[in-house]
């Protein structure tokens, strides 16, 4: 099972340095979110997702560079396909374009910035169009989310991400299936969102459940020791 990390995207978070450090530690990939503000601190600005992906792609050599996930309703599918093609030109064979339809969290963001939040059926249509456009560009398209309609779109994509689902929750893998969630390898809770059984057992449980990849948001997000401790545990069997 591959292990990857999500990069911190708050302004001033040292995005490129974090990505390069993750690569040097041996993580499989680095992924960016597509929020207008950091989820953990909505009063601060966030780095824009596609610009962040370009910076990371140019600054790294081996890691997969991906989005988790680009919101399909924020950009026309043709624009998203252009982003995918550009990233592939910068980082050939290292690009994964994760796509999503938006959820309760993103609805608050859209309303805050005066942007429309369409009904579910319209968002699902935008998601399907974005998947087809990205695949048409030659890039891999993933879909993130667990709503049944979203999963149906994922069946047409190259991969599927489930965010913070319980390790024991049964599921049918769809393409390359990844688990995403938070882990806190420092302090009293070294297994945040990994089932409460410890970090290594939690990772093993995800592998046994059938996941191909874990994509972790390591907290505290700007603590180098947390990232290194997670690497020591999560990548021990790969070294």
Image (cartoon, rainbow, N blue to C red):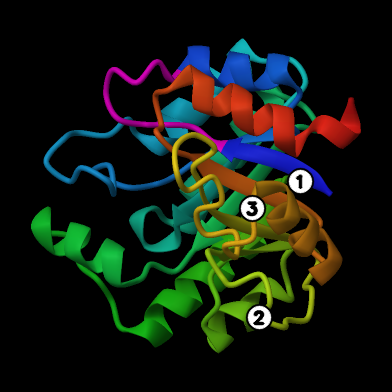
Check disc 3 and report the residue beneath it.
198
In the image, is residue 121 above or below residue 114? below
Q: Are marks 3 and 2 in contact (CB under 8 Å)?
A: no
What residue does disc 1 label? 138
Q: Earlier in the sequence, mark 1 or mark 2?
A: 1
In this view of the protein, which residue sits in the foreground, 153 or 165? 165
Residue at (52% x, 30% y) in the render: 53
- The residue nearer to you, when weighing 38 against 226, is 226
Residue identified by numbered label 2: 169
The C terminus lies in quadrant: top right
Between disc 3 and disc 2, the foreground one is 3
State which quadrant residue 73 falls in: bottom left
Neighbor class of circle 2 (other Cα within 10 Å; few <14, some 14-19, many 20+) is few
For residue 68, say whether it is visible. yes
In the shown orientation, is residue 75 left or right of residue 174? left
Q: CA distance from mark 1 to mark 3?
A: 39 Å
Q: Is residue 108 left or right of residue 187?
A: left
Q: Residue 180 sits in which quadrant?
A: bottom right
Q: Residue 135: x percent and y percent?
A: 71, 55
Earlier in the chain: of badge 1 and badge 3, it is: 1
Residue range highlighted in magenta: 6-15
């Amino acid at each position: 099972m591959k292990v990857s990390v999500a990069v911190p995207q708050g302004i001033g978070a040292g995005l490129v340095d974090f990505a390069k450090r993750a690569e040097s530690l041996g993580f499989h990939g680095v992924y960016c979110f597509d929020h207008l503000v950091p989820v953990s601190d909505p009063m601060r600005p966030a780095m824009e997702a596609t610009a962040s992906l370009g910076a990371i792609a140019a600054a790294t050599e081996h890691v997969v560079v991906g989005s988790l996930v680009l919101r399909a309703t924020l950009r026309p599918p043709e624009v998203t396909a252009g982003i995918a093609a550009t990233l592939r030109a910068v980082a050939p064979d290292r690009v994964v374009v994760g796509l999503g339809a938006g959820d309760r969290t993103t609805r608050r963001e859209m309303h805050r910035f005066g942007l429309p939040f369409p009904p579910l059926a319209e968002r699902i249509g935008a998601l399907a169009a974005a998947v087809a456009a990205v695949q048409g560009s030659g890039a891999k398209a993933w879909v993130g989310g667990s709503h049944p309609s979203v999963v149906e779109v994922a069946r047409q994509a190259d991969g599927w991400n489930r965010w913070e689902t319980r390790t024991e929750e049964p599921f049918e893998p769809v393409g390359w299936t990844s688990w995403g969630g938070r882990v806190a390898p420092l302090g009293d809770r070294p297994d945040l969102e990994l089932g409460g059984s410890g970090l290594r057992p939690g990772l093993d449980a995800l592998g046994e459940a059938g996941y191909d990849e874990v994509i972790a948001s390591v907290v505290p997000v700007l603590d180098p020791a947390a990232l290194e401790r997670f690497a020591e545990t999560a990548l021990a069997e790969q070294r």
